Amino acid sequence: SSLGFYEVEPASARYWFGSPLFDKAQLAVEGCTFTITVENNSDTNRYIFRQRFLENRPQAEIARELGVSQMTISRAEKNIVKKFKEEL
């Protein structure tokens, strides 16, 4: 989802959270405004997240493509997940 989340099971209201394509988005929800703000979400981090979690590609493969070490991808992935947990 472009906003960084989507409903997995409509009947149970379970959502999958990911990496938004936008730094900020606002949604009108039942008379209120729901704002999604992502700080320091670089193009590289969005790419790594998309490749690892949506495309299920190995860290080593992404690292070769970006010309960095697998450890660099591992650290970036860890920081991305940590940031999402802090923001939720």
Image: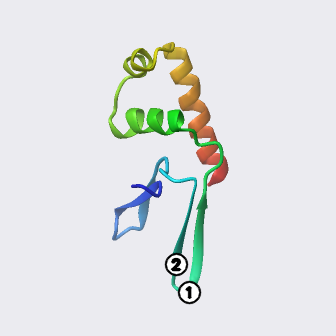
Tell me the element at label 2: strand
Amino acid marked by disc 2: Ala
Assign the N terminus to one quadrant of the image.
Answer: bottom left
Q: Where 78 falls versus 73 (above or below)?
A: below
Judge by depth and name the residue closer to the eye, 1 or 13. Answer: 1
- Which of the numbered marks, if any, corresponds to residue 28? 2
Q: Where 14 falls versus 31 (above or below)?
A: above
**Whole-percent x and y of residue 11?**
34, 71
Left or right of residue 61, residue 25 in this image = right
**Whole-percent x and y of residue 16?**
43, 54
Judge by depth and name the residue closer to the eye, 87 or 35. Answer: 35
Q: Disc 2, disc 1: CB below 8 Å? A: yes
Q: How is the image coloured?
A: rainbow
Give neighbour class at mark 1: few <14, some 14-19, many 20+ (Cα, 10 Å). Answer: few
Q: CA distance from mark 2 to mark 1?
A: 7 Å
Q: Where 3 falls versus 79 (above or below)?
A: below
Q: Residue at x 54, y 16 (%)?
A: 71
Which image quadrant for residue 47?
A: top left
The residue labelled by disc 1 is 31
Q: Residue at x 41, y 39 (%)?
A: 50
Q: Residue at x 53, y 31 (%)?
A: 77
**Whole-percent x and y of residue 10?**
34, 68
Tell me the element at label 1: loop
